[in-house]
Image (tube, rainbow, N blue to C red):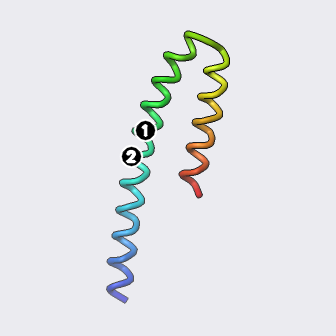
Amino acid sequence: MAPITSETTGLMRSFTIIRTIARITAAVIESICQSAMRGSPSARTYCTIFLIMWYESLCL
């Protein structure tokens, strides 16, 4: 039982690190998108779609 518990803890830790990196990446992308939005409306649409796809891929 103990090895499974430590394995699970390790997996949870890895998952948390991955999600943190993903959040930071998404925040960077979002700030780039906000700059792009000032330029053109189509850039805003593409960025929104990209962010939605990014968050969905995290949930899978």
Q: In the depicted view, which residue is nearer to us: 19 or 33?
A: 33
Label 2 amino acid? Answer: Ile
Asked if residue 50 is positioned above or below residue 40 in the image, the reply reads below
Q: Provide the secondary structure element on which disc 2 rests.
A: helix
Q: Amino acid at mark 1?
A: Thr
Kindly state the secondary structure of the residue where label 1 is placed. helix
Q: Is 27 left, or right, of 45 in this rendering?
A: left
| Residue on which disc 2 sits | 21
At horizontal 56% and vertical 43% (from top left) the residue drawn is 54
Q: Residue furthest top?
A: 39
Q: Position of residue 28 (x, y in %)?
A: 42, 31
Residue at the image position 32 percent from the left and 77 percent from the top: 6
Q: Nearer the viewer, residue 3 or 45?
A: 45
Rendered residue at 57%/44% (across/down): 55
When asked about the image quadrant of residue 2, the answer is bottom left
Residue shown at 57%/54% (left/top)? 59
Number of numbered tags placed on the structure image: 2
Q: Position of residue 30 (x, y in %)?
A: 49, 28
Residue 8 lies in quadrant? bottom left
The image quadrant where one finds the N terminus is bottom left
Query: Spatial distance from mark 2 to mark 1, Cα to Cα?
Result: 6 Å
* Quarter that holds the C terminus: bottom right
Residues marked 2 and 1 touching at CB (< 8 Å): yes
Residue holding disc 1: 25
Q: On screen, 42 above or below 22? A: above
Q: Residues within 10 Å of mark 2 (few under 14, many from 20)?
A: few
Q: Is residue 37 above or below residue 50?
A: above
Q: Is residue 42 left or right of residue 36?
A: right
Classed neighbour count for the residue bearing mark 1: other residues with Cα under 10 Å, few (<14), some (14–19), many (≥20): few
Q: Is residue 20 above or below residue 41?
A: below
The numbered dot on residue 10 is none
